Amino acid sequence: MAAEQGVDLSAITGTGVGGRIRKQDVIDAAKAAKARETAPAPAAAPTSGAPAETKAHKPVNVDGRKVPGILLIDETLDAATPFPGSLEVRKRFPNSSLIAEPGGTTHAGTLYGNACVDGQIADYLLTGKLPARKPGNRPDTLCDPLPQPDPTATAGAAATTAAAGSTSVTTGAGRSRPVFFPVTH
């Protein structure tokens, strides 16, 4: 019976009296072997910190033609969100509009005192209005990025204005930036 099932008796621990191999032990071993053959192989663990290899998959086709207007914002030198990716998203969502800050390196630096960017965001949030879309593979609006932070400014120099509900904050570099509060209708 073991030979018919392809079971190696030397690999089985018997459950019968004195460790004898029973018919059920052979059946169980055959079932376990079959289950191992049909189970997917586990992924190989990465070695020496290298990422595990993966198969290339078919790219997802994103069609944003039916999506209403989306406001996109990116700084052209932001390492976390490379600018060519923003242009690709703009292309795939033809009802969107892209604000670019050429030379900017900040990730998610919106509503942080840049009047050009912040005003367009406020318009979009209040009215749904997007900047006019321009033809071609380019941004629809260009805004100068904020200056890079001054690393020599002391951390204790940053202070909020004293009035509760104030509409500006003084930064460590002595500049004032607006603070936006939620608008309720």
Image: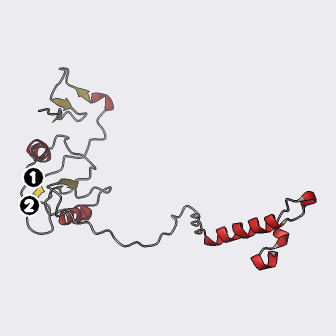
Along the line of sight, the residue nearer the viewer: 174 or 40:
40
Compared with 160, 25 (above or below) is below
Disc 1, SS: loop
Along the line of sight, the residue nearer the viewer: 169 or 133:
133
Along the line of sight, the residue nearer the viewer: 136 or 149:
136
* Residue 179: image tag: none
Residue visible at 58% across and 69% down in the picture: 40
* Residue 130: image tag: 1
Q: Position of residue 66 (x, y in %)?
A: 17, 61
Residue 33, image quadrant: bottom right
Residue that lies at the very extreme toward the right in this rendered image: 18
Residue visible at 37% across and 73% down in the picture: 58
Looking at the image, do the residues carrying marks 1 and 2 touch, with CB atoms under 8 Å apart? yes
User: Marks 1 and 2, Cα distance to the nearest angstrom?
Assistant: 8 Å
**Residue tagged by mark 2?**
133
Disc 2, SS: loop
Q: Residues within 10 Å of mark 1 (few under 14, many from 20)?
A: many
